[in-house]
Image (cartoon, grey):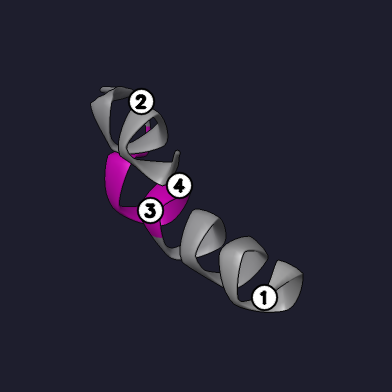
């Protein structure tokens, strides 16, 4: 789940945006 990506301290905000984009693309 994307939640795991948010846990990453490195570029959390940027990673969150990318994760959301990937999730939308997959849907």
> Which residue is identified by label 2?
10
Whether residues under marks 1 and 2 lie with C-beta atoms below 8 angstroms apart, the answer is no
Front label number (4 vs 1): 1
Q: What stretch is highlighted in magenta?
A: 11-16
Residue ID at (42%, 44%): 2
Q: Which is more toward the observer, 27 or 9?
A: 27
- Callout 1 secondary element: loop
Instruction: Report if residue 14 lies within the magenta region.
Output: yes
Q: Distance between the residues labelled 4 and 1?
A: 18 Å
Whether residues under marks 4 and 3 lie with C-beta atoms below 8 angstroms apart, the answer is yes
Residue ID at (37%, 28%): 4
Front label number (3 vs 2): 3
Front label number (2 vs 4): 4
N-term-proximal mark, 1 vs 2: 2
N-term-proximal mark, 2 vs 4: 2
> Which residue is identified by label 1?
27
- Callout 3 secondary element: helix
Q: How far apart are marks 1 and 3 (CA)?
A: 16 Å
Q: Which quadrant of the structure image shows residue 24?
A: bottom right
- Callout 4 secondary element: helix
């Amino acid at each position: 789940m994307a939640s795991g990506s948010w846990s990453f301290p490195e570029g959390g905000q940027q990673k969150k945006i990318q994760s959301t984009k990937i999730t939308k693309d997959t849907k």
